[in-house]
Amino acid sequence: MMIARGDLAIEIGYQRLTEIQEEILWLCEAAHVPVIWATQVLESLVKNGTPSRGEMTDAAMAERAECVMLNKGPFIAEAIAILDNVLTRMEAHQLKKTPQLRALHSW
């Protein structure tokens, strides 16, 4: 499953984007379906050599996916190194959490 967050935000609105991302991650984890975290991950870093604060947080949250997609740019090697460092650090933190789906109600 690829979570193309820009397209998803257009479809559902930016207000619900993070909530729906979580739902998709939880459902895919429960179904053992791999997830690709995509759309402008570390975009400023890849293009300009400096990431934004929001992009760093976004990249850290990508730890829960099986794959992260980066766009090409002049600083792609630096972006890969930084992404590897961030994901390695976040791995220890994510093991502390156990996401659970909320109760389903048929009414």
Image (cartoon, grey):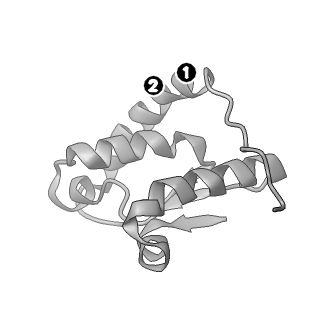
Between 12 and 37, the one nearer to me in the picture = 12
Task: Tell me where residue 85 appears, x and y as whole percent.
Answer: 40, 31
- In the image: residue 27, left or right of residue 2: right
Between 73 and 6, the one nearer to me in the picture = 6
Quarter of the figure with residue 78: top left
In what element is the residue under mark 2?
helix
Mark 2 is on which residue type? Arg
Alpha carbon of mark 1 to alpha carbon of mark 2: how far? 6 Å
Kindly identify the residue that appears in the image at 73 percent across and 54 percent down: 28
Quick one: label 1, few (<14), some, or many (20+) residues within 10 Å? Answer: few
Q: Is residue 78 visible?
A: no
Kindly identify the residue that appears in the image at 72 percent across and 44 percent down: 102
Kindly identify the residue that appears in the image at 44 percent across and 37 percent down: 84
Task: Tell me where residue 107 appears, x and y as whole percent.
Answer: 81, 62
In what element is the residue under mark 1?
helix
Residue placed under numbered mark 2 in the picture: 89
Task: Tell me where residue 57 appears, x and y as whole percent.
Answer: 34, 41
- In the image: residue 66, left or right of residue 44: right
What is the quadrant of the N terminus in the image? bottom right
Q: In the rendered structure, are the residues bearing label 1 and label 2 in contact, judged by CB atoms less than 8 Å apart?
A: yes
Residue placed under numbered mark 1 in the picture: 92
